[in-house]
Amino acid sequence: MTLSLRVAIVGAGPAGIYAGNILNNSVRAEGGEVSIDLFESLPAPYGLIRYGVAPDHPRIKGIVNSLHEMLDAGTIRLIANVEVGRDVAVEELREHYDAVIFATGAIRDTALDIPGIDLPGSYGAADFVSWFDGHPDVPRTWPLEAESIAVIGNGNVALDVARVLAKHPVDLRSTDVPANVLAGLEASPVTDVHVFGRRGPADVKFTPIELRELGEVPNVDVIVHDEDFTAVDPTQAPNNQVKIMLRTLESWRTRESTGASRRLHLHFYASPIEVVGTDRVEAVRFRRNEPVPGGAWGEVRATDEVREHAVQAVYRAVGYFGSPIVGLPFDERRGVITNVGGRVVDADGSHVPGTYATGWIKRGPVGLIGHTKSDAMETIEHLVADASAGLLSAPTSERDAVLALLDEREVAYTTWDGWLALDAHERGLGEIDQHPRERVKVVPREEQVAISRAGSLVASAE
């Protein structure tokens, strides 16, 4: 059977764009036809790449180039600045499309349930990342008042947060960091950033590149402690990635201090048990862990030793967590839309017809950006199989009816032409900046929307 499909994808980050591209190629390769509308709650596309990757990581941000090509091909229609569940209901999308794929990611911080975690001066890493990446829905200012800071977590996000906190702002001027963020970082009095992980150096969740970059930050000394390495035998490392990271850490043990004005400390075998303070953060208390004798590689156990580190701010980077969408089943424990292999299922385990998930909202916030491709392939295979089996309900309207609905509700949606206008505007700001760079991000949502919609009108007139 030759397929003719109309599909909505919710979320214009890598997961959603990859899913759209794979769906388009899959259906057309078999002689079918497919029209795809890509809905995004923000005025601009690219999700995690634009608002979740540190500004000093151009290598990762370079993924935007391939995502741009996929959207610029014209086979996927971008409808941005639309909040599904608020501006348009899930059930309404089901009426307008054969199928709906949710790729909304995970943007909330996982909770850290210890006493004092809600004290003033205690922050979630996801919120801080959104701030330094110029997310339009977070405050323009950030309280950077601490000289000594704790970052709790041993993954790449923890390293990003620690690096941005410790890095001298002059070394960020060449990036796309927004002007308000650069001004906030320039006023920071920080001297010491401490990163704490509950396991040992042999079981960190960093990637080798992220770790190596940490040691290349100008005028920042990286400090590790001999006591954390006494039980580590690099020759027994389970893979080359671990061996590379251990070699990097070992090199820092013997590197002499440069007398840098800022220091970044890596602490291992430290499980947080309390944030200490009366009116605000004053210290963090940890229980010291140790390797399990004869245990598996990286396995640790708690000891009776408790340590306290004086800090004035705490950032928890213990993972991201998905957000529920009105009208969809949600697994509150895992933070994902309830699904089996990408097919959304209800409380009874039955597939909700025509409804799918991909990316972090499908499997949880694990894996690198590239993993979303294989993830999307599984979801698309199931969608195409369901369509071929006649399990999808045909739309009850013409394709542009959804745009008419948004217009009727006075939703100021933006388009691909609008993004091209905003993109050009930001690049223009970069060219005339005091420190010329590739772009300067526009932060306020209303300003992004105004520039995008004006650009769409110009494109339509042409």
Image (spheres, helix red, strand yellow):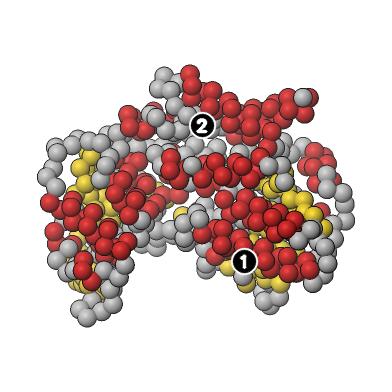
Q: Indicate whether 151 appears above or below 423.
A: below
Location of residue 379 in the rendering, given as x and y in whole percent from the top left corner: 64, 64
In space, the residues marked 2 and 1 are separated at their CA atoms by 35 Å
x 83%, y 44%: residue: 400
34 vs 264, nearest the viewer? 34
Q: Please name the residue that numbered disc 1 is placed on.
A: 378
Contact between marks 2 and 1 (CB within 8 A): the answer is no
**Callout 2, which amino acid?**
Lys
Give the side of residue 295 with respect to residue 94, left or right. left
Task: Look at the image and tell me whether residue 294 can be seen.
Answer: yes
Instruction: Count residues near mark 1 (Cα–Cα under 10 Å), then give few for <14, some for 14-19, many for 20+.
Output: some
Which mark identifies residue 412?
none
Task: Look at the image and tell me whether residue 117 can be seen.
Answer: no
x 14%, y 39%: residue: 258
Report the mark closest to the observer, 2 or 1. Answer: 1
50 vs 83, nearest the viewer? 50
x 80%, y 38%: residue: 407
Label 1 secondary element: helix
Q: Indicate whether 132 appears above or below 84.
A: above
Question: Split into 4 quadrants, where in the image is the C terminus?
Answer: top right
Location of residue 223 in the rendering, given as x and y in whole percent from the top left corner: 19, 49
Label 2 secondary element: loop
Sequence order check, earlier mark of 2 and 1? 1
Q: How many marks?
A: 2
Figure quadrant of residue 136: top right
Figure quadrant of residue 433: top left
Location of residue 118 in the rendering, given as x and y in whole percent from the top left corner: 39, 53
**Callout 1, which amino acid?**
Glu
Question: Split into 4 quadrants, where in the image is the N terminus?
Answer: bottom right
Location of residue 68 in the rendering, given as x and y in whole percent from the top left corner: 60, 41
Give the side of residue 36 with respect to residue 369, left or right. right
Q: Please name the residue that numbered disc 2 is placed on.
A: 441
